[in-house]
Image (cartoon, grey):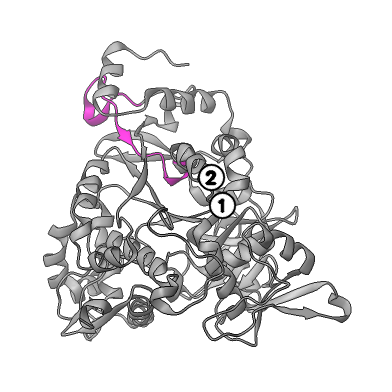
């Protein structure tokens, strides 16, 4: 292990760097541990088979089978949640929900439609936790130069609104910044307010006294925390987020629903991601060391986040606590994805199948040219692979022309804690650590990161859900994404047509999500909680 000077150690401590973790990563690198990580080699892309890759894009259709599995196994798996397929599961319309047994070559299997799965999924919600991965401060998110990524013409179309919104976002955790812009130009609810509101709405919808539903399991909302919230913050934003949550009960997006359900709207279990040190640039060769010349000063380190893949290490105690409290499934996604909320259909399929995890994938659009896609490996398994490194763009287009679906990773998933908790230390250790060289104002250094969704290459199996991008993956990497999705600049004739088409699609998805998932209604130019309009 590298022997660091007393001066450098003191600088690392002052800057909040996790020294043991940084040295552990460094030691593993120099020992060649990360050299053993094999690059993903894609053989093909999988078909949507209804078993390992499940199409949820038209799941509301009552007569369309969505998921198929062995009937005996489904009944055994659901029995753990008090769901008995041999008896009727009553939805609010009184319709028997039993699935439909398939005969002939598929004897012994059972098909489930979307409504079937929705009824079952509501029984799984009390066994579920809802977690988010917070980014750092939104410095890049609101940076003027970064937001030129879509070109000067696009930026000019939203420039005036950008100028008014950027100060509200800069240097703040992205989760507390506006998730959308109202049609009247005012800022909307924050990403975190919407996440917390989605949870309260799910709780309110399961209360039979309020809705007339007959749920399979009736949670006691006053003695348990339904859909417990958990999060990963960082050393840089934890205090700001904690202050935000202290005031959350008075939010108009949460206050009424919190009273209705009796739930604390902002009771977050929190794991704080430590900073790790930057390492020496690869041009300096091996052994790699701690980068100690930040901004040209001696014994000066550079603190950096280690990627969201550190969540398995940072949230280990939280996953364990949730499991001990009887929670079976942990939903996990990025705070800036408005489409990420617990989905009863997905939870039902997880429970029925007994798989250790499931992840969302959106069907490729012409604008999707970079990122991770679902692939089949030469060993016959499924994983996420980057276009270019694992499969060429030309090969992907050729498969697409032949009718194969190209599914992009949405960075959201569900983990079975029965599987995850006993293996979490091993997963945290095996998750690939990627080193990338940087040449910035601070100097030339290398950065080590872990990507959460590379866990797909470690798991023995998982379910891939094919979803509509505008329903489950409206993400905001830059403020300009939020503005365009909100409809800002849509009438500007200078807006490039390809950008306009994508923005129009995402704006329709945003409006649908705000209305149907987050319970808001457009009133006087603002998206307003429906319960406030009815009083």
Instruction: Decide: few, some or many residues near mark 2? Use Cα within 10 Å; few <14, some 14-19, many ≥20.
Output: many
Mark sitting on residue 166: none
Query: 328 or 131: which is nearer to us?
Result: 328
* Direction right: furthest residue: 104
Residue at horizontal 48%, vertical 16%?
1
Residue at horizontal 47%, vertical 44%?
309
- Left or right placement of residue 265 versus residue 45 in this view: left
Residue 77: image x %, image y %? 69, 59
Look at the image and give the residue range highlighted in magenta.
291-310
Q: Secondary structure at mark 1?
A: loop
Residue at horizontal 34%, vertical 62%?
195
* Predominant SS along the magenta part: loop
Residue 488 vertical position relative to residue 258 in the rendered view, above or below: below
Say whether residue 142 is visible: no
Instruction: Decide: few, some or many residues near mark 1? Use Cα within 10 Å; few <14, some 14-19, many ≥20.
Output: many
301 within the magenta span: yes
Query: 234 or 535: which is nearer to us?
Result: 535
If you read the primary sequence from the N terminus, does the residue marked by circle 2 or circle 1 appear first? 2
Say whether residue 365 is visible: yes
Rendered-image quadrant of the C terminus: bottom left
395 within the magenta span: no
Mark sitting on residue 323: 2
Residue 142: image x %, image y %? 21, 58
Whether pointer 2 and pointer 1 mark residues with C-beta atoms closer than 8 Å, the reply is yes
Q: Secondary structure at mark 2?
A: helix
Residue 150: image x %, image y %? 31, 68
The residues bearing labels 2 and 1 have C-alpha atoms spaced at a distance of: 6 Å
- Left or right placement of residue 164 versus residue 98 in this view: left
Give the labeled residue for mark 1.
328
Residue 498: image x %, image y %? 37, 80
């Amino acid at each position: 292990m590298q022997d660091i000077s007393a001066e450098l150690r003191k600088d690392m401590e002052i800057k909040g760097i996790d020294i043991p973790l940084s040295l552990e990563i460094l030691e593993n690198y120099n020992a060649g541990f990360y050299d053993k990580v094999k690059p993903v080699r894609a053989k093909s892309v999988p078909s949507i088979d209804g078993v390992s890759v499940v199409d949820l894009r038209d799941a509301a259709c009552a007569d369309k089978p969505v998921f198929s599995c062995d009937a005996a196994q489904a009944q055994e798996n659901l029995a753990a949640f008090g769901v008995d397929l041999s008896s009727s599961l009553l939805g609010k319309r009184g319709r028997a929900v039993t699935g439909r047994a398939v005969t002939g070559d598929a004897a012994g299997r059972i098909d489930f439609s979307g409504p079937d799965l929705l009824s079952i999924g509501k029984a799984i919600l009390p066994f579920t936790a809802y977690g988010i991965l917070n980014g750092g401060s939104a410095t890049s998110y609101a940076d003027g130069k970064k937001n030129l990524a879509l070109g000067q013409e696009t930026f000019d179309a939203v420039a005036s609104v950008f100028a008014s919104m950027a100060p509200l976002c800069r240097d703040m955790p992205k989760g507390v910044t506006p998730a959308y812009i109202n049609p009247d130009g005012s800022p909307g609810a924050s990403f975190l307010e919407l996440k917390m509101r989605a949870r309260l709405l799910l709780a309110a919808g399961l209360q039979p006294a309020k809705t007339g539903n007959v749920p399979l399991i009736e949670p006691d909302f006053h003695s348990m925390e339904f859909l417990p919230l958990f999060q990963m913050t960082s050393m840089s934003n934890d205090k700001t987020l904690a202050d935000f949550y202290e005031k959350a009960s008075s939010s108009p997006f949460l206050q009424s629903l919190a009273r209705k359900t009796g739930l604390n709207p902002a009771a977050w279990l929190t794991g704080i991601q430590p900073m790790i040190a930057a390492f020496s640039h690869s041009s300096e060769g091996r052994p790699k060391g701690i980068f100690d010349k930040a901004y040209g000063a001696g014994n000066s380190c550079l603190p950096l986040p280690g990627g969201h893949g550190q969540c398995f290490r940072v949230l280990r105690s939280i996953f364990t606590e949730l499991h001990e409290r009887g929670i079976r499934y942990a939903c996990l996604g990025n705070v800036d994805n408005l489409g990420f909320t617990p989905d009863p259909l997905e939870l039902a399929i997880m429970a029925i199948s007994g798989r250790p995890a499931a992840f969302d994938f959106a069907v490729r659009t012409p604008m999707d040219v970079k990122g991770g896609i679902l692939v089949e490996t030469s060993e016959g398994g499924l994983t996420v692979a980057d276009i270019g490194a694992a499969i060429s763009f030309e090969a992907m287009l050729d498969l697409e022309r032949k009718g194969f679906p190209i599914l992009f990773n949405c960075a959201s998933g569900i983990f079975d804690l029965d599987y995850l908790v006993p293996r979490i230390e091993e997963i945290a250790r095996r998750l690939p650590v990627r080193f990338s060289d940087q040449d910035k104002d601070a100097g030339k250094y290398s950065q080590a990161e872990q990507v959460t969704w590379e866990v797909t290459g470690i798991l023995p199996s998982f379910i891939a859900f094919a979803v509509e991008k505008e329903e489950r993956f409206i993400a905001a990497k830059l403020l300009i994404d939020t503005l365009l999705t909100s409809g800002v600049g849509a009438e500007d004739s200078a807006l490039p047509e390809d950008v306009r088409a994508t923005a129009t699609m995402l704006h329709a998805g945003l409006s649908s999500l705000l209305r149907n998932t987050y319970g808001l209604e457009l009133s006087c130019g603002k998206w307003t909680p429906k319960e406030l309009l009815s009083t």
